[in-house]
Amino acid sequence: SQKIEQNSEALNIQEGKTATLTCNYTNYSPAYLQWYRQDPGRGPVFLLLIRENEKEKRKERLKVTFDTTLKQSLFHITASQPADSATYLCALDLGSARQLTFGSGTQLTVLP
Amino acid sequence: DTEVTQTPKHLVMGMTNKKSLKCEQHMGHRAMYWYKQKAKKPPELMFVYSYEKLSINESVPSRFSPECPNSSLLNLHLHALQPEDSALYLCASSQRTSGSGTGELFFGEGSRLTVL
């Protein structure tokens, strides 16, 4: 069956460290993979999109990698800050269906 | 601030009521979506409209009835709901409608629905 798994429900790290979140999938062949941030009681906010033929994408303190052989994406936040505390969702886009399927999310807490 | 506006922000309704959730975007996006999100769960796709036509219905019960009156508006009509339908209902829009991928989704802040 198809699955999208994000490494852990919750991740706590110290301010200034790099947070690394994992998104693994099985029985999908996504053309694109996206990452979103969601704060409590609010809608998700788009962060980054990476294509299947791209290995890495960066935006300010954010970096995403996409390994279609391992069927895994890693999401890094460098120099993390308490304001980065939120739930981070990965989403698979198969390219043809015009829909995203979301992973379960990882709740990140950056401790001051 | 989000460019997708959802109303109402909160809605409490009884199981016999009829109500509607509304969504509006003025970004010129031609794909619009309804997602349902329960606490500590990811958003689950309900419906997709592409060029004002329903293109995806993810086996949603008929007590939820979507409507897209024009390219800027999306409604979700609710009737005879159950308490388990209580959730955050999210509207989203995206620019791409071809087979090249969904593209970035712009979400509204959601409508928190409680069914008594």
Image: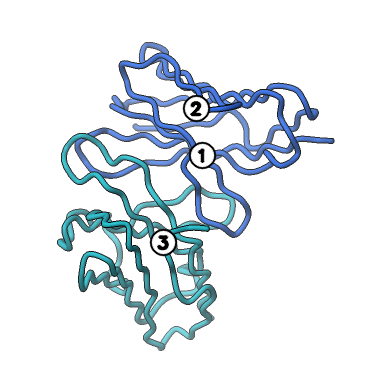
Chain colours: A blue, B cyan
Residue A68, position as x, y percentages in the image:
36, 16
State the separation of the CA atoms marked 2 and 3.
Answer: 27 Å
Position of residue A92 relative to residue B105, above or below, is above
* Tally of marks: 3
Position of residue B8 relative to residue A90, above or below, is below
Residue under label 1: A89
Residue under label 2: A23
Q: Amino acid at mark 2?
A: Cys
Task: Classify mark 1: helix, strand or loop.
Answer: strand
Residue A42, position as x, y percentages in the image:
56, 57
**Image quadrant where one finds the C terminus of chain B:** bottom right
Q: Please give the chain letter of the residue carrying mark 2.
A: A
Q: Please give the chain letter of the residue carrying mark 1.
A: A
Tag 2 and tag 1 share a subunit:
yes
Q: Earlier in the sequence, mark 2 or mark 1?
A: 2
Position of residue A59 relative to residue B60, above or below, is above
Q: Which mark is residue B4?
A: 3
Viewer-nearest of labels 1 and 3?
A: 3
**Could you tell me which residue is drawn at 52 percent across and 21 percent down?**
A74
